[in-house]
Amino acid sequence: MGKTLAYKILENHLVEGTLAPGEAITIKIDQTLTQDSTGTMVYLQLEAMEVDKVKTELSVAYIDHNTLQTGFENADDHEFIKSVARRHGVLFSKPGNGICHQLQLENYGKPGKTLLGSDSHTPTGGGLGMIAIGAGGLDVAVAMAKGTYSLTAPKVVKVELKGALKPWVSAKDVILYVLQQLTVKGGVGKIIEYTGEGVKSLSVTDRATITNMGAELGATTSVFPSDENTRLYLKEEGREEDYTPLAADPDAVYDEELIVDLDQLTPLAAMPHSPDNVDSVSNIGEIKVDQVAIGSCTNSSYMDLMKVAAILKGKKVHPDVSLVISPGSSKIMSKMAQNGALADIINAGARVIENACGPCIGMGQSPKSGAVSLRTFNRNFKGRSGTLDAQVFLVSPETAALSAIKGVLTDGMTSGEELPKIPETDFVPNDNFVVYPEGCNKDNTEVAMGPNIKPFPRNTALPEKVEAKVVLHAGDNITTDDIMPSDSRLLPYRSNIPHLSNYCFEKIDAGFSARCKEAGKCAIVGGENYGQGSSREHAALAPLYLGVKFVLAKSFARIHRSNLINSGILPLVFENPADYDTFELGDELVIENAPQQVTQDTIEVKNLTKDLVYKTKPNFSDLEQTMILKGGKINAIKDN
Ligand code: F3S
């Protein structure tokens, strides 16, 4: 039976397990990437593991999220990351160099390699024929320390591309179409693999736009074959020697299939407030536009911005539109400065800002109240732009640029505009934004711990008797954002758990943090689906810092449950959900013979205040038992 490309790459990297959908596998990780927002915690965790050099072929620490440095906090974080990177053999990309995924693609991505990144859009690397996966920070720290990553082997979905795209229709429209068909949940537990004759009509950066937004499908990753276009891209980037041709076997068997006829696609837009709320630009009609933002890891490649420059050349941005452009990398900005395209953009009346995530993460450029904002980004969730009532539409760079001139959402295909030709120019290599770790090691490089860098909270081995006081009796569907908010107020404190912990549960119960500090040893009682939402590790680390020993709930969201176990906090599920109603704040709880009970099917929790005994289900795997007994994942790895 023929193999899919995804499974060929996974098979080449298989360390443990059986490669079949649903099976637990461990794979070798060749490369890692981090960005600063998640990276501070990753490098605190890496330090805690006391490794010498990282075990990967290449690891890079990028600074692209919080580059504004409005106070000392961001600058402290950057310096901390730079110092730890040097100690452990990790490359450091300075702020201003660009967006992590664009830079990884340009400079380091290689067909057939595996990449693990502490950012959900790491699958961008799939455009180069990599298995590139986004993961939690601790997983990336462990991948650097051990060179491996464990996951459940996904199913593989075949997306067959037929024909070729028409003028004014681009890779963004392909992925918006796939999102319309499969929805934001359609990729969960799956790898999306692109095949078919249409693949060769797409450049590597087109493919990377498509694999980037595979994250919006919920997919583990997405992957394209490596072919002649891949070789040309690598040649342009000055590293043709990294090229390897790769493709699925002609008789490969897939779990699901979708056919996309590229010839039939028209310019599309994802309407507020979900990336799968897709309709054609012509159906949506000529709505008035207030802001256009072009950039992000989805659409800030050289070719994307050259198309924008060609459309803007000799034109004027509409008086009622604010057009803002953030290039994906310093190399792209530099090349456009040299060939005159940057002048074309500026002369049209566009604002050009730093090579960074910027407006994509709400770091500046929030639109005015009630604005319609067209963005070439990947997410349009309510409030992500920084303006709660803004209407954000996700579109291609071509649609964005043309609409910025017209002042209304415009379909270039039906408006009869001619798409200008893009001039060819070569890249000029420049790695002056990269700090290499040569000559540095753990012994000769100090960690720069500015006042914003606080030690990473660590748990201790599970004691015989776990005592705790109930400090919160929460309802159903508590999100990680409820547990540990992450707004622009708190984003600069991602490396400062003591500061963040003051805001733990502040939306639900402002007295939570103070109550924990008074109790010392704490327990949380929750309802159904406790910890749903993002994979934010801080939602486990802040409670750990505040003394939370265990959480009793009717059920847990999967990733948060893992994060609690990684921190050595016991997530316990009521055998009898009605027990939930018997608790009151201040109840004294105890788990006796805790290490013995952890290895059994039931754990008994006594309520000394109410004289009650609750039966709970731990459902711990062997590995999870070890982590709980040792006081978390890092302790378990260090003792191994
Ligand atoms: Fe940055 Fe936005 Fe991508 S925050 S990594 S440009 S999704």
Image (tube, grey):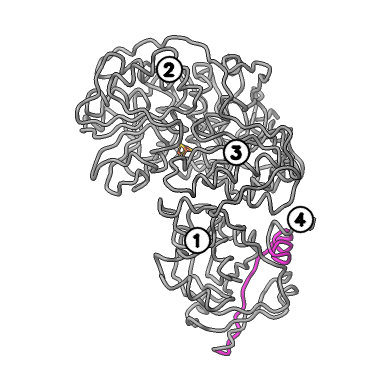
Task: Give the answer, above or below, for where 390 lies relative to 336.
Answer: below
Amino acid type at image mark 2: Ala
Q: Which stretch did the figure color magenta? A: 610-631
Position of residue 29 measured from the top left corner of the image (x, y, whole percent): 69, 38
The answer to which of marks 4 and 2 sits earlier in the sequence is 2
> Number of marks in the image?
4
Task: Give the answer, above or below, for where 526 lies relative to 264.
Answer: below
The answer to which of marks 4 and 1 sits earlier in the sequence is 1
Q: Which residue was labeled with disc 1? A: 499
Residue 346 tag number: none
Q: Which residue was labeled with disc 4? A: 638
* Quadrant where the N terminus is found in the figure: top right
Q: Which residue was labeled with disc 3? A: 61
Q: In 3D space, how far apart are the residues under numbered discs 1 and 3 (Cα atoms)?
A: 24 Å
Which one is in front in this view, the residue at disc 4 or the one at disc 1? 1
Residue at (59% x, 82% y) in the render: 589
Q: Quadrant of residue 562?
A: bottom right
Amino acid type at image mark 3: Ala
The answer to which of marks 2 and 3 sits earlier in the sequence is 3
Q: Quadrant of residue 291?
A: top left
Badge 1 vs badge 2, beta-carbon distance below 8 Å: no
Q: Which residue was labeled with disc 2? A: 337
Asked whether residue 23 is in view, the answer is no
Q: In 3D space, how far apart are the residues under numbered discs 4 and 3 (Cα atoms)?
A: 23 Å
Quick check: is 58 in the magenta stretch?
no
Q: Secondary structure at mark 4?
A: helix
The answer to which of marks 1 and 2 sits earlier in the sequence is 2
Position of residue 465 measured from the top left corner of the image (x, y, whole percent): 69, 79
